Image (cartoon, helix red, strand yellow):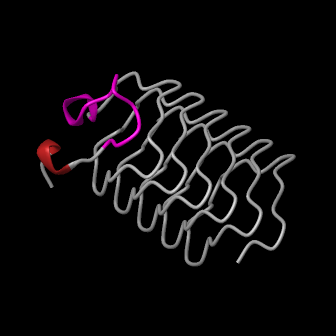
């Protein structure tokens, strides 16, 4: 997928050209964005809104998603190794087959999240809310 294929429908300050490794997207409204297979490794997504976003197969290795809202986001087969998801909201998120190795989920809200076949090896889930996790 090329950058031209990404869709960012809710934030005029963010274009498809802004979707790349290490970018600063803190506080951006990326809800319902189409970011399939995007390379957002080491990106700053602090406080970003990604509700309903399609991030299937995206690389979010080492990304800062602290305080981000990822409710109902599709992160199937995404790579979130060493990502900071502290205090993030992942309610009803689809993390099927996602790699969350060594991710920080401290205080994350994961009610009804689907983590089927996800790799949580070494992940910190201290104080995370894991109600009805599938």
Viewer-nearest residue: 107 or 27: 27
Q: Is residue 9 left or right of residue 66?
A: left
- Magenta stretch: dominant secondary structure: loop
Instruction: Determine which quarter of the picture holds residue 39.
Output: top left
Where residue 122 appears, as percent x and y from the top left, is: 65, 53
Where residue 14 appears, as percent x and y from the top left, is: 32, 28
Name the residue at 53% across, 31% down: 64
Where residue 81 appears, as percent x and y from the top left, is: 49, 48
Name the residue at 62% across, 60% down: 121
Q: Which residues are magenta?
A: 8-19
**Which image quarter holds the C terminus?**
bottom right
Viewer-nearest residue: 50 or 122: 50
Where residue 44 appears, as percent x and y from the top left, is: 46, 26
Q: How many marks?
A: 0
Within the magenta stretch, is there residue 9? yes
Against 134, residue 111 (above or below) is: above
């Amino acid at each position: 997928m090329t950058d031209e294929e990404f869709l960012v429908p809710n934030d005029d300050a963010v274009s498809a050209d802004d979707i790349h490794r290490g970018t600063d997207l803190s506080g951006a409204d990326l809800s319902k964005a189409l970011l399939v297979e995007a390379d957002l490794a080491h990106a700053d997504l602090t406080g970003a809104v990604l509700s309903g976003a399609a991030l299937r197969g995206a690389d979010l290795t080492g990304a800062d998603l602290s305080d981000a809202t990822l409710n109902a986001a599709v992160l199937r087969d995404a790579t979130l190794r060493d990502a900071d998801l502290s205090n993030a909201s992942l309610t009803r998120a689809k993390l099927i087959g996602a790699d969350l190795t060594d991710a920080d989920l401290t205080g994350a809200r994961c009610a009804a999240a689907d983590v089927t076949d996800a790799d949580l090896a070494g992940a910190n889930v201290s104080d995370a809310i894991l109600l009805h996790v599938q």
